[in-house]
Image (cartoon, rainbow, N blue to C red):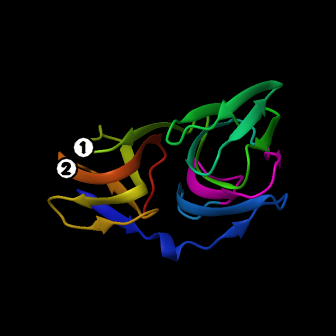
Amino acid sequence: MTVHVLRADERPAVPWKNGGGLTREVASAPVRAGMPDFAWRVSLADVAEPGPFSRFEDVDRIITLVDGPGMVLTVDGTPHTVAEPYVPFPFPGEAATDCRLLGGGLVDLNVMVRRGRATARVEIVRDRVALTPPAGTTLLAVVLDGSAVFEASGPVLGRFDAALITDARDEPLEVTGVTALVTLTGAATDA
């Protein structure tokens, strides 16, 4: 199994184009791909202001509230309340999407995959989980609260730390708190 630890304190904060928040890229494929070139991209975002989301043609998105009171996302005219932490909400990236905050800023986990190049699934885990990805799959574990430790290989992950996992063979991950396990198929990363 290959585990590449990605520490939260090593991620630069990048302002959004519309000035409504900051994003910190956790991982992407290809590594350090720009917005027009990624197959998949996972980030943590600080949302400070209400407003429109950027459009991403041919991209599927999954957003998960981590901290804060939540938001109402209006996707192509239909409002969706995203106020319960750790519940993934999928929507198409090209949809006209507007955000209204429910009482203040928030932090969310944002997963984006380019249709035809990659797919993603977000699972929230709160205890011990065996990591057994199928061939051609990359796993990204992102600690959203508490900590997680790989029982066999030893790396300990703190809040917002992540681990990019390839070639896993029944590697147990012990979670104390909440971790998002993102399963990505398609373009692999060479991290």
- In the rendered view, does 156 fall on the left or right side of 151? right
Q: What number is the disc on residue 172?
A: 2
Image location of residue 85, percent across then percent down: 53, 42
Residue drawn 73% across and 53% down?
104
Residue 9 or residue 49, whichever sits in front: 49
> Separation of disc 1 and disc 2 at Cα?
6 Å
Residue drawn 24% across and 52% down?
173
Q: Amino acid at mark 1?
A: Val
Disc 1 and disc 2 in contact, CB within 8 angstroms: yes
Provide the residue span drawn in magenta.
34-55
Mark with earlier residue (1, 2): 1
Q: Residues within 10 Å of mark 1 (few under 14, many from 20)?
A: some
Residue drawn 29% across and 37% down?
134
Image location of residue 150, percent across then percent down: 22, 59
Q: Is residue 123 above or below residue 33?
A: above
Q: How many marks?
A: 2
Q: Quadrant of the N terminus?
A: bottom left
Q: What number is the disc on residue 129?
A: 1
- In the rendered view, does 27 fall on the left or right side of 166? right
**Residue lying furthest left:** 152
Describe the element under mark 2 as helix, strand or loop. Answer: strand
Image location of residue 37, percent across then percent down: 66, 53
Dividing the picture into quadrants, the one containing residue 78 is top right
Q: Quadrant of the C terminus?
A: bottom left
Residue drawn 44% across and 50% down?
188
Image location of residue 24, percent across then percent down: 61, 64
